[in-house]
Amino acid sequence: MKNFDISLYFVTDSRYQDEAGFLHQIEEACAGGATIVQLREKDKTSREYYNLGLKVKAITDKYNLPLIIDDRLDIALAIGAAGVHVGAEDLPVKRIREIAGNDFIIGATAKTVEWALDEENQGADYLGVGAIYPTKTKVKTVLTSVDTLTDIIHHVHIPVLAIGGLNGDNLDVLKGAPINGIAVVRALQCAEDPRKTAQDLLAKSHALQQR
């Protein structure tokens, strides 16, 4: 069984700061309680993604946290990341598992029970379900109801996290959904005090998990 915790899953977005500021936000979020970090870059070249990945991995290694790379298995393998997160348009989970091995963490997006079961059967280690709220990230956003999120959780046997526009002020919508964690982007990337924000979000995530 892989040892990872998705209670507070920080998905990065480098559009909001210069590189030094971006890395500072990640460092502070990790110090404050982020339990896992996903580096997500939609517009960088492979070389840029690789170079930034090495810098982010130096931070996550310092805090003994897994680094997940969005979409790009090649980048994940090149920098020695812990895993990759994929969506419907990316490489199939089954093929990634064949390439990367059993110790590699594979996360997958799912928006329906059927989709979730398929990803689990292919070998996904966790699922990201959303978007719960509209987002401002450069990804295609299709809203997912909390009822669907809850239904997915009841049908699979792997951890499930909620994602999409979540922050410290709107997590109450998840009450009653037996999630394993929350994924946030701007709530940490744009926080004035990312360390304190991470502490607060982790506490709220744990509270939701205990309901």
Image (cartoon, rainbow, N blue to C red):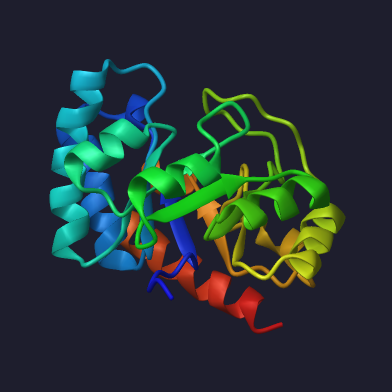
Viewer-proximal residue among 135 and 200: 135
Is residue 68 visible to the viewer in this orientation of the structure?
Answer: no
Q: Residue at x 79, y 65 (%)?
A: 155
Left or right, residue 96 beside residue 53: right
Viewer-proximal residue among 56 and 31: 56
| Identity of the residue furthest to the front in this view | 98
In the image, is residue 196 above or below residue 54?
A: below
Quadrant in the picture for the C terminus: bottom right
Q: Quadrant of residue 158?
A: bottom right
| Identity of the residue furthest to the bottom in this view | 210
Viewer-proximal residue among 175 and 148: 148
Quadrant in the picture for the N terminus: bottom left
Query: How many marks can you see?
Result: 0
Q: Quadrant of residue 121?
A: bottom right
Tell me where residue 118 appears, x and y as whole percent.
71, 49
Is residue 65 visible to the viewer in this orientation of the structure?
Answer: yes
Viewer-proximal residue among 11 and 3: 3
